[in-house]
């Protein structure tokens, strides 16, 4: 009976720990924009609005597009502050292709260009043959970032971390290979101390609930 209780306790503690880890690490890739933009536009969305000054903290940004004309290819170039951030990887939002081009017969994927020395990510995708994507919106790609220098962020608490498109290198092309330069608003995350009050509340609540639950089980 004692071993059974110990086994149940271990399972409970492992489950709670896994849930806490998911709160830190899970980065969802949105299927619908949270802040739609009228065409023509290319913009950034994220699952967070606050950037903790926590070294090693990782988060994702998702790039979206809305076009008023048929689209054959797209490209974006986004600058970020490389004094405290590194871009670690990037990918299309539907696996081997963007969600925007999902359903198209064939695409030509490319590898993202990540330059942490300058601080930018360059990415693109094109259709093949006579295909075209009708006017509309969809997500293009996600970019993963990591906080590399918390000491700099700590000095900037209360300010914002800005991610900006290079307007000359962010566009989509029509089937006639004519470039259209959409509106490209910048994206900002509010810099906060290492542990926000919401995160502390979640961790404290989970810890208290675990202690009470385990104590009752062992009685």
Image (cartoon, rainbow, N blue to C red):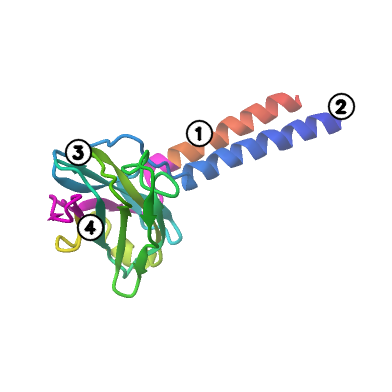
Q: Position of residue 63 (x, y in %)?
A: 29, 49
Q: Tag 1: Cα neighbours inside 10 Å, few (<14), some, or many (≥20)?
A: few
Residue named by callout 1: 205
Q: Is residue 151 magenta?
A: no
Callout 2 environment at 10 Å: few (<14), some (14 to 19), or many (20+)?
few
Question: How far apart in space, not on screen, are marks 2 and 4 (Cα)?
Answer: 57 Å
Identify the residue shown where x is 68% and y is 30%: 214
Which disc is residue 217 wearing?
none
Dot 2: what SS?
loop
Nearer to us of marks 2 and 4 is 4
In terms of depth relative to the viewer, which is nearer, 91 or 109? Answer: 109
Residue at the spot x=79%, y=29% of the render? 5
Q: Where residue 190 sits: x, y (%)?
A: 26, 51
Residue that numbered label 2 is attached to:
1
Does the magenta segment cover residue 193? yes
Bounds of the magenta segment: 172-199
Q: Earlier in the sequence, mark 3 or mark 1?
A: 3
Residue on which disc 4 sits: 162
Query: Distance from label 3 to label 2 (Cα)?
Result: 65 Å
Q: Nearer the viewer, mark 3 or mark 2?
A: 3
Tell me: residue 9, above or below residue 183. above
Pair 3/1: label in front? 3
Q: Secondary structure at mark 3?
A: loop
Mark 2 or 4, nearer chain start: 2
Instruction: Point out the tag, 4 or 3, that comes first from the N-terminus.
Output: 3
Observer-nearest of 66 and 20: 66
Q: Which residue is mark 3?
A: 135
What distance separates the C-alpha of mark 4 from that of mark 3?
Answer: 29 Å
Q: Are marks 2 and 4 in contact (CB under 8 Å)?
A: no
Mark 3 Cα-neighbour bin, 10 Å: few <14, some 14–19, many ≥20? some
């Amino acid at each position: 009976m004692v071993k059974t209780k110990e086994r149940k306790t271990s399972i409970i503690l492992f489950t709670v720990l896994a849930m806490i880890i998911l709160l830190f690490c899970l980065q969802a890739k949105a299927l619908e924009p949270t802040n739609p933009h009228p065409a023509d536009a290319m913009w950034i969305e994220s699952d967070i609005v606050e950037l903790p000054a926590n070294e090693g903290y990782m988060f994702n940004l998702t790039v979206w597009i809305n076009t008023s004309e048929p689209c054959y290819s797209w490209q974006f170039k986004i600058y970020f502050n490389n004094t405290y951030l590194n871009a670690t990887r990037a990918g299309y939002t539907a696996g081997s292709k963007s969600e925007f081009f999902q359903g198209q017969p064939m695409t030509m994927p490319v590898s993202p260009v990540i330059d942490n020395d300058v601080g930018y990510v360059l990415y693109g995708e094109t259709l093949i043959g006579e295909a075209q994507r009708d006017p509309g919106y969809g997500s293009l790609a996600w970019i993963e970032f990591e906080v590399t220098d918390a000491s700099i962020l700590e000095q900037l608490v209360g300010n914002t971390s800005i991610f900006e498109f290079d307007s000359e290198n962010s566009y989509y092309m029509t089937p006639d290979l004519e470039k259209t330069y959409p509106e490209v608003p910048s994206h900002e995350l509010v810099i906060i101390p290492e542990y926000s009050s919401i995160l502390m509340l979640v961790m404290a609540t989970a810890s208290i609930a675990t202690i009470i639950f385990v104590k009752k089980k062992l009685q």
